[in-house]
Image: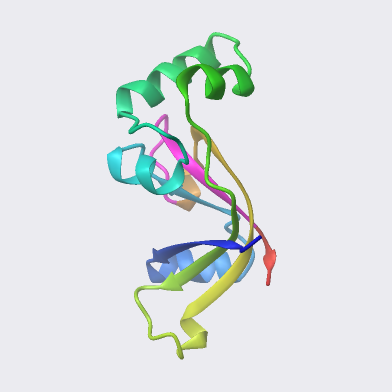
Amino acid sequence: MKSLNLQLPLKKKWFEMTKAGIKTEDYREINEYWIKRLTDNDIDLTVDEINAGLCALRDGYTEDHVYNCYGFWFKPFSINTMTLGYPKSTDTERILKLEHKGIEIREGNPEWGAEPGKIYFVIKHGKVI
């Protein structure tokens, strides 16, 4: 099976923290763009449908129940390619490939750029490839 790559451009501060192994996850807004980019489903989900699933999670339902009931799951990425801005493919100093360790929906770490109390798609990184 072909590995699926998730490429994410970063600002210098976040790229350097990720490269140093300090920042182990990245945050993306829950909006139509990121829903379409990160989820793998047969229907076009809305922010309201994702939020309905989040409410169900907060009410004690399991992730499997929510994903089955609300019809979304995440694409099977295997690599997170983090870039400093939008480098040329030959500029290896500005490209970092990491294991993809999954995506969660939750609050992020404010020290890593998340707004306190806000819910995000949290893209988790593993070791450098």
Q: Residue at x 35, y 30 (%)?
A: 45
Q: In the image, which residues are magenta? A: 113-125
Kindly give the residue lying farthest to the top in the view shown.
Answer: 59
The residue most toward the bottom is: 90
Which residue is pictured at 60% across the width and 12% down the height?
Answer: 61
Q: Position of residue 10 (x, y in %)?
A: 40, 65
Lateral position of residue 109 relative to residue 24, left or right: left
Determine which quarter of the picture holds residue 115. Answer: top left
Nearer-the-camera pick, 28 or 17: 28
In the foreground, 72 or 120:
72
83 left or right of 61? left
Image height of 64 relative to 16, above or below: above
Find residue 31 and report its image quarter.
top left
Image vertical order of residue 111 relative to residue 46, above or below = below
Tell me the quarter of the image containing the N terminus. bottom right
Q: Which residue sits at x=29%, y=39%?
A: 32
Residue 48 at x, y = what percent? 31, 22
Between 32 and 3, the one lying in front of the other is 3
